[in-house]
Image (tube, rainbow, N blue to C red):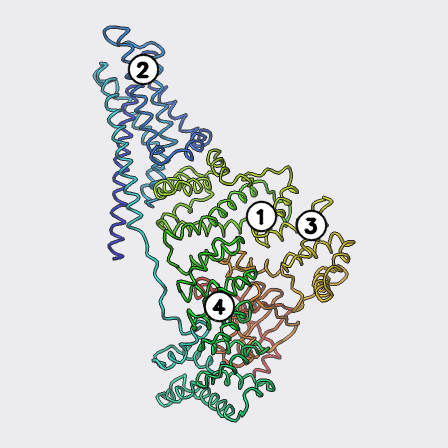
Amino acid sequence: MNANKHTDNNLYKSKVQKYSTILYILNLLCFGCLTSIFLYGAYSLFNPDTSYLLGILVLVLISALTNKFLQKPYWYIRPKVSQVIFSNLFNSITLVFSILCLILFYFNYQSEGSGIEFGIFGSLILIIGLPLCYYVWMIFSQTNEKSIVNIIGSEGFMNFKNYEIYFVLIFIALFGLIYDFLPQNVETLLYLPIVLLIIFSLLIFALNNIIHQTIINFFKSSKTIKEKGNVNTNIIGLYEKQPYQLIAVLDHNFFQKTFDEQKYLLFTLKRISAIDATDYLQKLLNDCDKENPIYKTLTEIHKYLANVGQKLNEITNPYEFIEQSNDIVLIKALIRNQISNNDKNLTIKLLNDNRISIKKPACIIAGYYDDINIISTLIEHLENPDLSHWAQIALGNIGEKSIKYIEIEFTKRKQNLLFVESCFSLICHIASEDGYKLLFKSLNEPDSNLRKIAAKKIIIHNVLVTDDHRKYFKKLFDDLILTLLSNGYLMEQLDRKNENFTTLKNAIENENRESLYLIINIIKLYYNSLVAEQIFKNYRKKTMNLHAASNLLIDLAITDNLSVKNKLKLLFSPQERLLLESLQEDFPVINLRPKFNNEEDLIWFILKKEYDQINSWTRTCALNILQYTYKDDIPFELASEFLNKNQLLKETAAANIYNNLPEFYTIFLSRLSDNESTQIDYLIRSNLDVANPKQVNQDNLLLADKIQFLITTPYLNDLSVSEIINFHAYFKPKVLKAGDHQISLQEEFNLGFWLLETGNISFSKNGVDFFDYKKRDIIKVSDHDNPSENVYIHCEGDVRFLIVEELILMNIIEDYDEIMQKYIDILPDKSSKKMITQLNKDAA
């Protein structure tokens, strides 16, 4: 089937090229006719040589000036007309010119009685046809033809189009040379060219229509069908994605798996104290050759779990044991034991334990139950960054029964965007009709952040969207169009005066990218996906043929909704007055083209927007610029953000007041509760106190610094700023002081990805071979791919990491395996090995 589609694609592509070649020949014939008419008129005013040279000189001059000075007619006309009109402007002008000539002949014939002789006016009309039509052809027809070639992707044909103008000029010049050898009568030199010009012009109308239909068929034949990913998950990372398949995978062709996969499975069983796997491991041991590299590890893990199982059997009262013991290994074994024991009360108690390392495996076991109390507890965990994904896995395993409880809790907790993200991901995973109803209804929520999250989940999870759902996307689509237009005008007026202005501009650009992503994918839901990609491939590009290509596809593809078509065309022609006026009628209270006398007015315009109209990072960047303005109401604006529930805005306002308005700092601080006041004051002073060096502590990382770091981290580039703001809590700070450190892999909280936020380190898995890492580098700390039970780190100074579970990155980064493997594998190879004497001695 794919081969057939590829063949059809090439067939339509070759047809477009063939029709374009015919069109080119017709254009040449039109120019031959126009040249004959031009010379006939010019000969009555000038001598033949002057007429010939004058014609060539005028055309060369038009060619030279068009690219730089004569493009305004294109930008004025193209947004106002459809593709049918635009593609036929050249032949329309030639047709009008031919009719004008016929009218001229008629009046001259009536006045002369017999024969035709033109005066100066008549001759000028005949002369003006060639340069006028040539200019129209260059600006409109050639641009249209280049846009078509750009769409079908024919590089060779595009190279020809780039030199086409020279071939046309050569053709006209050669025709002028043979003109004097033609029969010198009015029928041959004037009547026949005009008749042929009319015929060729009409043929071009028909040919353009055929080309348009062929382009539509070209994209239909290229249409791709989204297929769900392979249900077979990679073995490495299986527990983090499909924990309920772990034992089944262990029991199925274990010895045919790779050594790394075998180690991952065994160490995962050890980490979760999977005593329910002991019998399976015994069976594998019986079948395993002692020469097999995995035999030793298999023996150790089996012995370890058997020993844990024996200790578990000695526990008489599991409830008391949970409350009194800190033996995490045995408690995890107790949790796994509930798969067969089915003690719901004990499971609920484990879910409410105050230790995260207990709650995580308890969530997985809770997924075997459909008890309402367990479901309610799991839903509460959705807004906890440490437990959210584990609770999602459990609720996903419970299935459709959890949806009605999610719907109830959603109305109470939808202010928490992390909870919203988790709920919508879970709904898409369960894929029930009731869940989808909640998802689509959320597209009409007053808060635009909720609408965007819902739309992203629909897009990412390929939720089936029908024409009945189109009404749900209208409000979001309009908001996104308005955001792009408004931000576009802001960007034009925003000068880069200092670092903070650059940061603000980058923040606005990030918002634009997110809006553009959603617009493209909403269009894909209802129209050909390849057409949507081609349309926006040329967004913000200023060349005429690329602009024309996008407009061509908009006109041809979107034929069922004039409002959508005009809004998309406005994105590509934001200065077009008629389109702006049309949009302004729909949104009369919104200033689509704000004008600012200075940058200060611009900043206040941003800050006065509603909180859901711009994300908190853009507002933070705008707040940072207040210190460079001088209005009297600045302290009061900062005061309002100081009392904001949003932690990012609160910290930013406090930092700005501390730096620039110290006389207000204590006053504003006193308005907070004692606990919050102490915490904010510690954060600000430990980072900004000029009397003391900046401290690197585990609990004093400013949220703005954290988000700025995550935004500029290369392997998180695919996440929007809004997503990073929602997900930042997953990244936990950890500080190591200067010196040598030995990190135990037996501690679960040490496992995951370590992002180097501050400082430089040397890292080793074996204590012998060390590699250098710098800021923004990433290290994978794992128990199953390490030669020892520890890793070793040497810190040149105080170092701060952001640690995130592998499970989190698997779920929030698209193409996780490809992206993360690139950074994990390549970074150490670029580093130099170092030896640390003391650690080497310890390792020895």
Callout 1 amino acid: Lys
Which is more toward the observer, 587 or 336?
Answer: 587
Can you say whether 464 is above or below 48 in the image?
below
Per the model, the C-alpha gap separating discs 3 and 4 is: 40 Å
Callout 3 amino acid: Glu
Q: Secondary structure at mark 2?
A: helix
Of pointers 3 and 4, the one earlier in the residue sequence: 4
Of pointers 3 and 1, the one earlier in the residue sequence: 1
Q: Which mark is residue 637?
A: 3
Instruction: Classify residue 326 by image quadrant.
Output: bottom right
Mark 1–mark 4 contact, CB under 8 Å?
A: no
Q: Residue furthest right?
A: 663
Q: Is residue 153 visible?
A: yes
> What's the residue at 66%, 42% (across, down)?
600
Left or right of 469, for residue 172: left
Q: Secondary structure at mark 1?
A: helix
Reading the image, the residue beneath label 2 is 41
Of pointers 3 and 2, the one earlier in the residue sequence: 2
Per the model, the C-alpha gap separating discs 4 and 2 is: 85 Å
Q: Which mark is residue 505?
A: 1
Of pointers 1 and 4, the one earlier in the residue sequence: 4
Instruction: Classify residue 353 by image quadrant.
Output: bottom right
Reading the image, the residue beneath label 4 is 405
Q: Position of residue 721 (x, y in %)?
A: 54, 56
How many residues crowd mark 4 within 10 Å: few (<14), some (14–19), many (20+)? Answer: some
Mark 3–mark 4 contact, CB under 8 Å?
A: no
Callout 4 amino acid: Tyr
Q: Which mark is residue 116?
A: none
Of pointers 1 and 2, the one earlier in the residue sequence: 2
Callout 2 amino acid: Gly
Image quarter in which the C terminus is found: bottom right
